[in-house]
Amino acid sequence: MYRSRTKIVLLCCAGALALLAATSSLAERKHNPNIQSHSVAILEADGIRFRDLDRDGKLTPYEDWRLSPEARAKDIVNRMNLAEKLGSLLHGTLPSVGPMGSVGIGPRYDLDRARAMIVGRNITFALTRMDGRAGELAAQHNRLQDIAEEGRLGIPLTISTDPRHHFQGVVGASTAALAFSKWPEATGLAAIGDPSVTRHFADIARQEYRAVGIRVALSPQADIASEPRWARANGTFGDDPDRVGRQVSAYIEGFQHGTKGVTKDSVVAVVKHWVGYGAAKNGFDSHSYYGRFAAIRRDALWQHIRPFEYAFRSNAGSIMPTYSILEGLNVEGKDVEQVGAGFNHFLVTELLRKRYGFKGVILSDWGVTEDCPRACTEGSGPNEAPIIGMPWGVEELPRAQRAAKMLNAGVDQIGGIDDGSLLVEAVQQGLISQDRIDDAARHVMAQSFALGLFEDPFVDVGLAESVVGATAMRHAGFDAQRRSIVRLEERRGILPLRPGKTRIYLYGMKPDEARRRGYEVVDDPAKADVAIVRTATPSQMLHPKSLFGRFQHEGDLDFKPNNAALVAIDAAAKSVPVIVDVYMDRPAILTNIRAKAAALFVNFGASDAALLDILGGVIKPHGRLPFELPSSMDAVRNQRSDIPHDSKMPLYPSHLNPKFGSLFFGRIV
């Protein structure tokens, strides 16, 4: 009897072990990644497939997807030669044909130059500024991955992009949505006020990016829009640190597909700009030499850090330091070095790495190691090639020393360059240690491994065409446009506008959408029942020779007497009620419009159709201001650049507008 019982126990144990083995095998097969190669052979063992990236016929540890990204990164870095390591520390811009090919703008990629960059100079990360049909983008990105397979270690290319789902396209900051679903700017998502909408947007954008082969999003901005004149306010989530933080968290979770950090289903979120970028001195952006300073003081610094704390909790994959010099900042009795944040050891290593424990990739902004000669500081003429360099605070250092200072400050990857010779020179001069190079390279490679690119860098061209800009995605974007519109004023009896019974005079709008809805469009306000005027926050080209001054909106925020839209409002108001809608890429001063408008709306990226849905009563306006609207330029000039919503007697306060002193005083950075 004893022997029988023993036999039964052994049989049960054997059965359990067999079941466990079968379950493990099933789980392993379930989690097997899709393996794709074009020119690299496939290794197979026990039904498990791997790419033979180094072409040695054996399974090398970095080829083994069963290992952790960190273990694989350690192995591949040990196998890299110096040129390959240094190439991984550069984040280039994909070259294109055409007049702006040097900054990546053109109808298609220049594949010969791309090969020289990827294979010849060992670049493994690169920004795309191309746009076009989704299938064409996907096909071109597959071609780039074919080129990457030619490398000695077969390292795939990790492709990044500036935001490309919104209305505004600014060189060096964003790409206008064409093939992709179209959403309001980040400020518009903030105006909706629901992080779940932002998370849904980011998840849709993640799917569209992945479909064409883009795996890194150079967004979101965790900057707070504390300086109303600043040109980059439209990329923020407004002026309240905690509101911004909640939106940043939702954005990261949508793009990275959860809160666990970077996985094979992610698009990496690069949170920017660490830290204080929104406190732009006099509102001038730090892309330009004259805007290189942020006017931030110690008592306000924590407010600018606060949104990043949310990003850390959501396990953001990357952080990008700001171009700006934090002018005269003193923290805990120590003067902060007067160099751009990417060169600043205190801001990057002491604060970001050590105090806040960030473990992901730190990527510099573009052009920080490049020269800014006279044509850059004073501006180039219209027929001169643009010179792009933002080495603020280190202008006098040679390029190799700038690169060394940046890596030694704690940055892992330098954005906007693809020539590693300056790093070679820095190594030869003993300015960068081998340990620092290896540490940075491991951070960068671990991210690519986590994304699953070493297993499957290619995309399905047909799937890209069906996913990008799909009907449901466009409808979601359009609904967000409508929900983000803010109603500031409305006199009774003006709205809703009734199709078939309303004659409309339009300014700043094409007539097609209004006619399609049954409105009669007239060419004279005297013949109309109502006028609709669409315009935007005013700006002036204060530095016309500046490359970025040509694209970014600068200067005063008020409507001057000769402003064309204001003239149109004045003329129309003599005959009919006027509905005014103002697009705000930064706050506008509406003091001299308010009394003339029968209804006053603002938007942060909304089509004519979205506005007409509001005016026609299809949907009620939901949006609330993400930042305050000042009452005058005197109030703007007298407010502090680093404190949000602090102008005197704002015309329209932001919808939160807490008393910051009681919330933040006493907090020590």
Image (cartoon, rainbow, N blue to C red):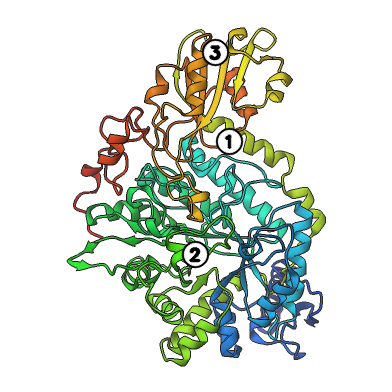
Give, as a three-letter code, the residue at label 1.
Answer: Ala
**Secondary structure found at label 3:** loop
| Residue linked to disc 2 | 318
Left or right placement of residue 111 versus residue 243 in this view: right
Check if mark 3's residue and mark 1's residue have beta carbons within 8 Å: no
Up/down of 355 relative to 430, above or below: above
Residue tagged 1: 480
Q: Residue at x 37, y 46 (%)?
A: 242
Q: Quadrant of the C terminus?
A: bottom left
- Can residue 321 be seen in the rendering of this structure? no
Distance CA(mark 2)–CA(mark 3): 47 Å
Mark 1 vs 2, N-terminal side: 2
- The residue closer to the viewer here, 622 or 648, is 648
The image quadrant of residue 657 is top left
Residue displayed at 57% across by 16% down: 531
Residue 233: x %, y % from top left: 44, 45
Decide which of tag 2 and tag 3 comes sooner along the chain: 2
Secondary structure category for the residue under label 1: helix
Q: Nearer the viewer, mark 2 or mark 3?
A: 3
179 left or right of 227 in image: right
Residue 643 visible (yes or no): yes
From the viewer's perspective, is the residue at label 3 or at label 1 nearer? Answer: 3
Quadrant where the N terminus lies?
A: bottom right
Q: Amino acid at mark 2?
A: Ser
The residue drawn where x is 77% and y is 90% is 57
* CA–CA distance in space, label 3 to label 1: 21 Å
The residue singled out by tag 3 in the image is: 495
| Tag 3: amino acid | Leu
Kindly indicate the quadrant of the structure image that contains residue 263: bottom right
Q: Are marks 2 and 3 in contact (CB under 8 Å)?
A: no
Please give left or right for residue 570 compared with residue 449 in the image.
Answer: left
